[in-house]
Amino acid sequence: MPLTDNVGVAVLIGGKSSRMGSPKEQLITKDNQSFLMRICSEMDFFKYRYISHNSSQKYSYDGYRNVTDLIENIGPMGGIYSLLKTIESESVLVVACDMPFYGSEAAVEILEQYRGQDAVIPLCRGRREPLGGIYHRRIIPVIEELIAHGDYRLGMLIDRVDCLQFESKYQVQYENLNNADDYKRYLALSDRFEKRFQK
Protein backbone atom coordinates (compact mmCIF):
# COMPACT_ATOMS: atom_id res chain seq x y z
CA MET A 1 0.00 0.00 0.00
CA PRO A 2 1.52 3.39 -0.97
CA LEU A 3 2.19 5.83 1.84
CA THR A 4 -0.52 8.46 2.19
CA ASP A 5 1.20 10.95 4.51
CA ASN A 6 1.40 13.49 1.67
CA VAL A 7 -1.98 12.79 0.04
CA GLY A 8 -5.38 13.03 1.73
CA VAL A 9 -8.69 11.89 0.29
CA ALA A 10 -11.96 13.77 -0.05
CA VAL A 11 -15.42 12.61 -1.06
CA LEU A 12 -17.13 15.39 -2.99
CA ILE A 13 -20.88 15.72 -2.35
CA GLY A 14 -21.47 19.41 -2.97
CA GLY A 15 -23.60 19.07 -6.11
CA LYS A 16 -27.31 19.84 -6.37
CA SER A 17 -28.23 16.40 -7.85
CA SER A 18 -30.90 18.13 -9.91
CA ARG A 19 -30.83 15.56 -12.70
CA MET A 20 -30.99 12.65 -10.25
CA GLY A 21 -33.95 14.11 -8.37
CA SER A 22 -32.53 13.17 -4.96
CA PRO A 23 -29.12 13.55 -3.26
CA LYS A 24 -26.68 11.17 -4.91
CA GLU A 25 -24.72 10.55 -1.72
CA GLN A 26 -27.87 9.12 -0.10
CA LEU A 27 -28.61 6.61 -2.87
CA ILE A 28 -28.52 3.05 -1.59
CA THR A 29 -26.40 0.23 -2.94
CA LYS A 30 -27.76 -3.29 -3.27
CA ASP A 31 -26.07 -4.24 0.00
CA ASN A 32 -27.90 -1.40 1.78
CA GLN A 33 -25.11 1.14 2.12
CA SER A 34 -25.35 4.74 1.03
CA PHE A 35 -23.02 5.75 -1.77
CA LEU A 36 -21.25 8.04 0.70
CA MET A 37 -20.79 5.22 3.22
CA ARG A 38 -19.41 2.85 0.60
CA ILE A 39 -16.79 5.23 -0.74
CA CYS A 40 -15.77 6.41 2.72
CA SER A 41 -15.30 2.84 3.93
CA GLU A 42 -13.17 2.06 0.87
CA MET A 43 -10.90 5.06 1.54
CA ASP A 44 -10.33 4.46 5.25
CA PHE A 45 -6.62 3.65 4.77
CA PHE A 46 -5.82 7.34 4.18
CA LYS A 47 -4.39 9.29 7.09
CA TYR A 48 -6.26 12.49 6.16
CA ARG A 49 -9.91 12.11 5.14
CA TYR A 50 -12.51 14.73 4.25
CA ILE A 51 -16.10 15.14 3.13
CA SER A 52 -16.55 18.18 0.87
CA HIS A 53 -20.04 19.73 0.89
CA ASN A 54 -21.95 22.97 0.54
CA SER A 55 -23.45 24.93 3.44
CA SER A 56 -26.89 23.33 3.11
CA GLN A 57 -25.56 19.79 3.55
CA LYS A 58 -24.80 18.19 6.91
CA TYR A 59 -23.08 14.83 6.73
CA SER A 60 -20.63 13.03 8.93
CA TYR A 61 -18.67 9.81 8.74
CA ASP A 62 -16.35 8.51 11.43
CA GLY A 63 -12.76 9.55 10.76
CA TYR A 64 -13.70 12.15 8.15
CA ARG A 65 -13.44 15.91 8.59
CA ASN A 66 -16.14 18.07 7.02
CA VAL A 67 -15.05 20.85 4.65
CA THR A 68 -17.72 23.39 3.65
CA ASP A 69 -17.40 25.20 0.33
CA LEU A 70 -15.77 28.60 0.76
CA ILE A 71 -17.32 29.70 -2.55
CA GLU A 72 -20.63 28.11 -3.47
CA ASN A 73 -22.44 27.50 -6.75
CA ILE A 74 -19.32 27.18 -8.89
CA GLY A 75 -19.36 23.40 -9.20
CA PRO A 76 -16.53 21.01 -8.30
CA MET A 77 -13.98 23.80 -8.67
CA GLY A 78 -15.33 25.30 -5.45
CA GLY A 79 -15.00 22.03 -3.58
CA ILE A 80 -11.44 21.44 -4.74
CA TYR A 81 -10.47 25.01 -3.89
CA SER A 82 -11.95 24.74 -0.40
CA LEU A 83 -10.20 21.43 0.20
CA LEU A 84 -6.81 22.72 -0.87
CA LYS A 85 -7.21 25.71 1.45
CA THR A 86 -8.00 23.32 4.34
CA ILE A 87 -6.05 20.07 4.05
CA GLU A 88 -3.16 19.11 6.31
CA SER A 89 -1.53 17.05 3.55
CA GLU A 90 0.20 18.57 0.52
CA SER A 91 -2.30 17.07 -1.93
CA VAL A 92 -5.75 15.51 -1.98
CA LEU A 93 -7.40 12.76 -4.00
CA VAL A 94 -10.89 14.00 -4.90
CA VAL A 95 -13.54 11.30 -5.43
CA ALA A 96 -17.07 12.11 -6.56
CA CYS A 97 -19.86 10.58 -4.48
CA ASP A 98 -21.67 9.41 -7.62
CA MET A 99 -19.02 6.78 -8.50
CA PRO A 100 -20.46 3.78 -6.61
CA PHE A 101 -17.96 1.27 -8.04
CA TYR A 102 -14.93 3.31 -6.97
CA GLY A 103 -12.71 1.36 -4.61
CA SER A 104 -9.32 1.15 -2.97
CA GLU A 105 -7.63 -0.41 -6.03
CA ALA A 106 -8.22 2.71 -8.13
CA ALA A 107 -6.98 4.90 -5.27
CA VAL A 108 -3.81 2.84 -4.89
CA GLU A 109 -3.24 2.96 -8.64
CA ILE A 110 -3.26 6.77 -8.76
CA LEU A 111 -1.18 7.06 -5.58
CA GLU A 112 1.48 4.97 -7.29
CA GLN A 113 1.53 7.55 -10.11
CA TYR A 114 1.91 10.52 -7.77
CA ARG A 115 5.38 12.08 -7.49
CA GLY A 116 4.45 15.53 -6.24
CA GLN A 117 2.95 16.82 -9.50
CA ASP A 118 0.45 19.68 -9.51
CA ALA A 119 -2.21 17.17 -10.53
CA VAL A 120 -2.57 13.53 -11.52
CA ILE A 121 -5.63 12.67 -13.60
CA PRO A 122 -6.80 9.20 -14.67
CA LEU A 123 -8.03 8.57 -18.19
CA CYS A 124 -10.79 6.17 -19.17
CA ARG A 125 -10.67 5.33 -22.87
CA GLY A 126 -8.77 8.58 -23.36
CA ARG A 127 -11.32 10.69 -21.47
CA ARG A 128 -10.10 12.66 -18.47
CA GLU A 129 -11.69 11.93 -15.09
CA PRO A 130 -10.93 15.04 -12.99
CA LEU A 131 -13.22 13.90 -10.16
CA GLY A 132 -10.95 10.98 -9.51
CA GLY A 133 -7.73 13.00 -9.56
CA ILE A 134 -5.05 14.24 -7.16
CA TYR A 135 -4.53 17.99 -6.72
CA HIS A 136 -1.62 19.78 -4.98
CA ARG A 137 -1.99 22.86 -2.78
CA ARG A 138 0.41 24.82 -4.98
CA ILE A 139 -2.30 25.19 -7.65
CA ILE A 140 -4.43 27.39 -5.39
CA PRO A 141 -3.30 30.62 -7.17
CA VAL A 142 -4.27 29.12 -10.53
CA ILE A 143 -7.73 28.23 -9.21
CA GLU A 144 -8.14 31.71 -7.73
CA GLU A 145 -7.26 33.26 -11.08
CA LEU A 146 -9.78 31.08 -12.92
CA ILE A 147 -12.48 31.87 -10.36
CA ALA A 148 -11.77 35.58 -10.67
CA HIS A 149 -12.39 35.26 -14.42
CA GLY A 150 -15.56 33.24 -13.91
CA ASP A 151 -14.08 30.09 -15.45
CA TYR A 152 -14.97 27.06 -13.34
CA ARG A 153 -14.01 24.33 -15.82
CA LEU A 154 -11.78 21.64 -14.36
CA GLY A 155 -10.46 20.95 -17.84
CA MET A 156 -9.09 24.48 -18.00
CA LEU A 157 -7.45 24.01 -14.58
CA ILE A 158 -5.81 20.76 -15.68
CA ASP A 159 -4.48 22.43 -18.82
CA ARG A 160 -2.90 25.24 -16.78
CA VAL A 161 -0.86 23.12 -14.35
CA ASP A 162 1.83 20.41 -14.37
CA CYS A 163 -0.46 17.42 -14.78
CA LEU A 164 0.33 13.74 -15.26
CA GLN A 165 -2.43 11.91 -17.14
CA PHE A 166 -2.48 8.12 -17.31
CA GLU A 167 -4.84 5.46 -18.65
CA SER A 168 -6.43 3.66 -15.71
CA LYS A 169 -6.94 -0.08 -15.79
CA TYR A 170 -10.01 0.36 -13.55
CA GLN A 171 -12.44 1.71 -16.11
CA VAL A 172 -15.67 0.62 -14.39
CA GLN A 173 -14.68 2.27 -11.12
CA TYR A 174 -14.93 5.70 -12.75
CA GLU A 175 -18.48 5.18 -13.96
CA ASN A 176 -20.60 8.00 -12.54
CA LEU A 177 -24.37 8.29 -12.25
CA ASN A 178 -26.13 11.46 -13.42
CA ASN A 179 -29.85 10.64 -13.41
CA ALA A 180 -32.49 8.12 -12.37
CA ASP A 181 -31.95 6.01 -15.49
CA ASP A 182 -28.24 5.74 -14.65
CA TYR A 183 -29.15 4.60 -11.14
CA LYS A 184 -31.44 1.88 -12.51
CA ARG A 185 -28.63 0.76 -14.81
CA TYR A 186 -26.25 0.65 -11.84
CA LEU A 187 -28.64 -1.56 -9.87
CA ALA A 188 -28.91 -3.91 -12.82
CA LEU A 189 -25.14 -4.10 -13.30
CA SER A 190 -23.92 -4.09 -9.73
CA ASP A 191 -24.48 -7.80 -8.99
CA ARG A 192 -21.31 -8.69 -10.85
CA PHE A 193 -19.29 -6.29 -8.67
CA GLU A 194 -20.88 -6.79 -5.24
CA LYS A 195 -18.45 -9.49 -4.05
CA ARG A 196 -15.60 -7.06 -4.65
CA PHE A 197 -16.95 -4.77 -1.92
CA GLN A 198 -17.80 -7.36 0.72
CA LYS A 199 -15.45 -7.18 3.66
Image: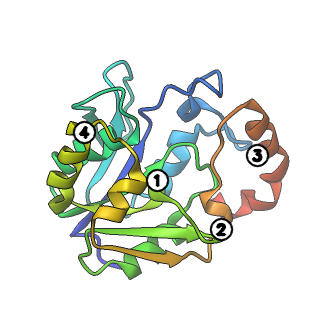
User: Mark 1 sits on what residue?
Assistant: 131
- Residue 113, picture quadrant: bottom left
Crowd tier of the residue under label 4, counting other residues whose Cα lies within 10 Å: few below 14, some 14–19, many 20 or above: few
Residue at numbered disc 4: 149
Residue type at numbered disc 4: His
Q: Pick whichever, 161 or 2, lies toward us.
A: 161
Q: Measuring from the top left, give residue 16's x and y in whole percent.
A: 50, 25
**Which quadrant of the view contains residue 156?**
bottom left
Q: Which residue is mark 3?
A: 186
Circles 4 and 1: CB atoms closer than 8 Å: no
Q: How far is the residue under mark 4 from the one under mark 3?
A: 37 Å
- In percent of the image, x 55 and y 47: which residue is there? 38
Q: In this orientation, which residue lies closer to the viewer: 198 or 169?
A: 169
Residue visible at 39% across and 41% down in the picture: 76
Q: Secondary structure at mark 3?
A: helix
Q: Residue at horizontal 41%, vertical 46%?
A: 11
Structural distance between the alpha carbons of marks 2 and 3? 14 Å
Using the numbered discs, state the Cα–Cα distance from disc 2 to disc 1 in whole angstroms: 14 Å
In the displayed structure image, the side of residue 104 where residue 124 appears, left or right: right
Q: Position of residue 187 (x, y in %)?
A: 79, 43
Specify whether residue 150 is in view: yes
Q: Can you tell which mark lies on residue 60?
A: none
Residue located farthest toward the front when viewing the structure as drawn = 149
